[in-house]
Image (tube, helix red, strand yellow):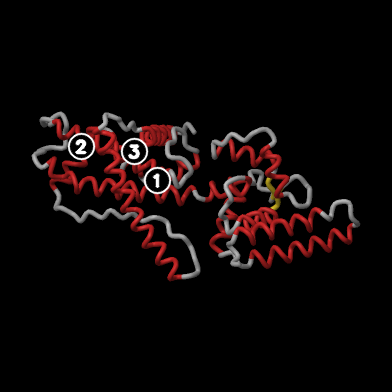
Amino acid sequence: QGFGSSRFGCTLFKVSRRLFGAAHGHPAATFQVQMSARREALMQAASAVPHQTKLKWQVAFNQFDIAQNGVISVEELRQVMVQKLLMTPKDGEVENMVATVDLNGDNVISYEEFELMMVAAGRGKAAGSGFAHVVHRLIRMPEIAALIIAEAKNFVHNFCQQHRDTFAGLTTPDVNAAEQLPAYYDAWQIFKEEGELMMQSTMLLWGTAQMKTFEPEFLDELNQTGILDSFLRYLDYASFIELMYHSATQPQQHCDQNSARPQTPLGNSSVQKRLAELDFELANMDYKRNQLLAERRRLVGCEIDSVTTGALKQQLEMAQYREDVGND
């Protein structure tokens, strides 16, 4: 089987654990032999890992290694989980994570042990629990941030093109200088509802459909994308009217429902191409589904609250304010 298969990853991890586990209580010479055998097995498996993936692992390791002493302790792992990822580990959970990866029993995780864990998890694709899952979540922050801004910009563009005729009679972007028709408010409500569903669909790739609290590191990643100015500020009616005014007064543009979703890295180019085609179709389906779902919920009188988008907007604005006044 290929390197990325979960069966191979599990086998490698079990073999490595066996090599190290047998060393405790044995003479030093036996311990050194088993150390060498374990390192050789690791090097052979790690040689199949793409260089770009290893770079991500190294960056992630450095974020956990708060003391920058080359190892990760229980307290460092707990601190990253609680403060950066806003996770709430159970009693003994962090200790078990470290013990599972700590092959030589020194109660800390070296980079070599860290890399073996990621190799066993299958090229960075964690099984959904354990330390590898925490690392995978941290690594994916920039990717998810890039996906969110791509989907948000695509949504704004498509919405403007589809609803621009509603605002053909709008003579000024100033809400206080022109009559605001009921149709304008209706379009704004639709924008907020479909935008919320778009955000929830995107957040499914992050691990949850609705979020009210976001990790500081994740907010930093999103802040760098400019999502406040390119999407979230239009949740305010005055900003939305400005957006639609400029859209209505500009030449009509092509409505492209596809958004630039992250590619799945594979060595097989034909498979990669097919995956890109599938992602294209899925993006179109998600966009249409959100439109239909929003309309259906309006017809049955079930409002869609701006849970995720509203919370994200508020927390990004607060983070930006703190940065501006120097109160981190």
Residue placed under numbered mark 3 in the picture: 196
Mark 1 or mark 3: name the one nearer the start of the chain: 3
Q: Point out which mark residue 202 bears.
A: 1
State how far apart marks 1 and 3 are (Cα).
10 Å
Going by the numbered disc 2, the residue's amino acid type is Ala
Residue 321 in view of the camera? no
Q: Is residue 51 left or right of residue 243?
A: right
Name which quarter of the figure residue 307 lies in. top left
Residue at 80% from the left image edge and 53% from the top image edge: 21
Within 10 Å of disc 2 (Cα), the crowding (few <14, some 14-19, many 20+) is: some
Residue at 71% from the left image edge and 47% from the top image edge: 100
Name which quarter of the figure residue 45 lies in. bottom right
Helix, strand or loop at mark 2: helix
Residue placed under numbered mark 2 in the picture: 187
Residue at 78% from the left image edge and 47% from the top image edge: 106
Q: Position of residue 254 (x, y in %)?
A: 20, 56
Residue at 56% from the left image edge and 36% from the top image edge: 87
Q: Position of residue 17 (x, y in %)?
A: 75, 55
- Cβ atoms at labels 1 and 3 below 8 Å apart: no
Helix, strand or loop at mark 3: helix
Mark 1 or mark 2: name the one nearer the start of the chain: 2
Going by the numbered disc 3, the residue's amino acid type is Glu
Q: Point out which mark residue 91 bears.
A: none
Within 10 Å of disc 1 (Cα), the crowding (few <14, some 14-19, many 20+) is: many
